[in-house]
Amino acid sequence: MYSTLTVPVLTDGDVMSRFQVRVAEIDASVALLAELLPRVRPGRFVTAVESSGHPGQVPGHGVGLVEGWRGTIAHRVELAADGTLARVKIVDPSFFNWPALPVALAGDTIVPDFPLANKSFNLSYAGNDL
């Protein structure tokens, strides 16, 4: 479908290494866009929803995972019998990352270290870091 892209890999843990990986990721994204955008054709992109054939059963559902700037964003969608949205659930990255914070604070970590550790995770309290 498209040419092979090189995915950057972090081999060191310092700030400059992480920055260089981000730059390489941007370069790979721009290269992919430059390759795919000329292939886009005008018109509608529609997929028909087919019923499962079982009365009273939701005709379709799906799960999608995408990478956001804080981590994985999960989507779950269910369709009603008439093809409209019946349920939609979006889970932000902080939901998945909050359980790691107590683990990071275990051991010799003292209470005054909490703000530093908390900001290192950069978690959302309200769940709107989409």
Image: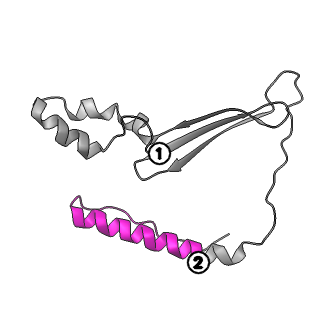
| Pointers 2 and 1 in contact (C-beta within 8 Å) | no
Front residue (pair 42, 11): 42
Residue at left offset 54%, top offset 40%: 74
For residue 44, what is the image quadrant? bottom right
Task: Give the percent coordinates (x, y) of residue 76.
Answer: 62, 36
Quick one: SS at disc 1?
Answer: strand
The amino acid type, in three-letter code, at marker 1 is: Thr
Residue 15 in magenta stretch? yes
The answer to whether one can see residue 108 in this image is no
Q: Residue at x 59, y 40 (%)?
A: 75
- Point out residue 65 in the picture as x, y percentages from the top left corner: 56, 45
Q: Nearer the viewer, residue 8 or 25?
A: 25
Numbered circle sitting on residue 34: 2
Q: Is residue 95 above or below residue 34?
A: above
Coordinates of residue 94 in the picture (x, y in percent) = 40, 38
**Given the image, on which type of amino acid does mark 2 rest?**
Ala
Marks 2 and 1 sit apart, C-alpha to C-alpha, by: 25 Å
The mark nearer the N terminus, 2 or 1, is 2
Residue bounds of the magenta highlight: 6-34
**In the image: residue 57, left or right of residue 91:** right
In the displayed structure, does residue 99 sit left or right of residue 26? Answer: left
Q: 129 or 4, which is in the foreground? A: 129
97 w.r.t. 6: above or below: above
Say whether residue 51 is left or right of residue 74: right
Give the secondary structure at mark 2.
helix
Main secondary structure along the magenta-highlighted residues: helix
- Residue, x 45% and y 66% (percent of image)? 7
Which residue is the site of mark 1?
72
